[in-house]
Image (tube, grey):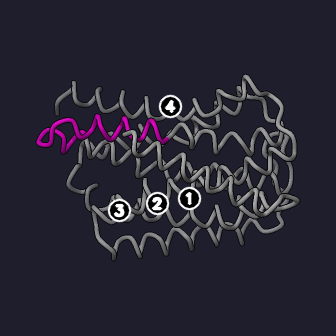
Amino acid sequence: MDIQLFFTTLLAATITMLATGLGAVPFYFFPRLSQKWSRRGYGFAGGVMLAASVFDLIIPALRRGGYSPVAIGLTVGTGVFLLSEVWLGDKQIDFGEIRGASARRVLLILGTLFLHSFPEGVAVGVGYGAGQENGNLGFLLALAISVQNIPEGLAVTLPLRAEKVPVNQCVFWAIFSSVPQPIAAIPALLAVSFFQQILPYGLAFAAGAMGFLVVSELIPEGLEKGDRLEIGTIVAIGFLLMTIAHTLV
């Protein structure tokens, strides 16, 4: 095992994790979030996550494994999220100072992005492992994921700020949602061939969970007491900005 490669992979995956926290930084300059902007924030987060599920998860899964792993992963991911919704139901849930349905929504968002970070960490590890024969593949993957993590950190922060969670805590939770990236990168580096086989399933699983979250939680919350045309436009803007982020890397 190349020790330098080990620490390079760990450092790259840690940087991708920390980049998620940058999504919360704008709220240091715009500390107040009115109810109207909270609704818009949910729409924007929905657009960002829809784009992430397509560009970060489904398309790479198709390239790596074809249609069957994607169909299986999407089905399982959607099913797991649906069961989570049913299990949580009307349970009284607390998340810090957040109560009830809002706490449930925040937990679902964090949980979904946390799961979605595992296959991204695997991708970094596989990229560095395979990169010994394919140039700077690991570096390019880590760079792309870092850029994409910033708007995902914003998507985590928006619902938290809507519930008046302090910005410092938002930074923490945004970074926390990406903790699996350095955790998953090292095993993937050490067992490249094995993780290359299961990666398409993991990517599609995360896409199924994320897509269901957007449709069942984020967009409906944005539409509640919000203008349908406005929220639809904001969802499209979030999707477009995430698309542009992909074109840059």
Q: Quadrant of the C terminus?
A: top left
Q: Are marks 1 and 4 in contact (CB under 8 Å)?
A: no
Residue nearer the viewer, 94 or 101: 101
Q: Which residues are magenta?
A: 128-148
Q: How much space separates mark 1 and mark 2, taking CA atoms?
A: 6 Å
Give the mark, 1 or 4, whose residue is nearer the N terminus: 4
Residue under the image location 47 percent in, 45 percent down: 244
Observer-nearest of 6 and 12? 12
Give the labeled residue for mark 3: 61
Between residues 94 and 134, which one lies in front from this camera angle?
A: 134
Kindly identify the residue that appears in the image at 87 percent across and 40 percent down: 34
Circle 1/circle 2 CB separation < 8 Å? yes
Question: Residue 73 at what x, y percent from top left?
Answer: 43, 69
- Give the number of the disc on residue 19: 4
Task: Determine the secondary structure under disc 2.
Answer: helix
* Three-letter code, disc 3: Ala
Main secondary structure found in the magenta portion = helix
